[in-house]
Amino acid sequence: MAPTFAAIGLAVADLEKSLAFYRRLGLDIPAGAENAPHVEATLPGGVKLMWDTHETIRSFDPGFSPATGAGRVGLAFACAGPAEVDRTHAALVEAGHASHLEPWDAPWGQRYAVVLDPDGNGVDLFAPLT
């Protein structure tokens, strides 16, 4: 049997800030999860998104050093339409998160925007143009 892809893990500096960001994107993360060293949320389709604090990772990997620069990990969220891309982007920026790319109509036929999560990971927002 071949291994089955099951999860995406994020190493985070501030678990509370990271979970708040992803809750704003609609992920069902249990209340009080920010008090745990490891958190998991099951996404549609069964894949899990997991968060571990840098301290938790260092507890089993003492040489751990957080990645820096662009391209660490990229996550993408499908929106219901172009207006939802704009609204979601605006709401995240208003909540204090950095916009990497303002919403635009991409040549491949999608409304697209990129916001950075609290650890600098790019989170794409997209929807088909109507």
Image (cartoon, helix red, strand yellow):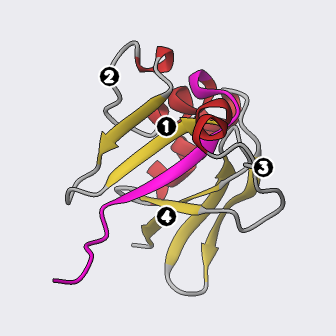
- The picture quadrant where one finds residue 18 is top right
Q: Which residue is mark 1?
A: 22
Q: Residues within 10 Å of mark 3 (few under 14, many from 20)?
A: few
Q: Which residue is mark 2?
A: 30
Q: Work out whether mark 3 precedes mark 2 in sequence or the reverse, and give the earlier one.
A: 2
Q: Of residues 12 and 26, which is closer to you in this image?
A: 12
- Distance between mark 2 and mark 1 Cα atoms: 12 Å
Q: Residues within 10 Å of mark 4 (few under 14, many from 20)?
A: many
Q: Is 95 contained in the magenta span?
A: no
Tell me where the magenta segment starts and ends, as one range.
1-16
Camera-near label (3 vs 1) is: 3
On the picture, is 76 further left or further right than 69?
left
Q: Which residue is mark 3?
A: 65
Camera-near label (2 vs 1) is: 2
Q: Residue at x 49, y 19 (%)?
A: 34
Going by the numbered disc 1, the residue's amino acid type is Tyr
Q: Work out whether mark 2 precedes mark 4 in sequence or the reverse, and give the earlier one.
A: 2
Going by the numbered disc 2, the residue's amino acid type is Pro
On the picture, is 44 further left or further right than 24?
left
- Distance between mark 2 and mark 4 Cα atoms: 26 Å
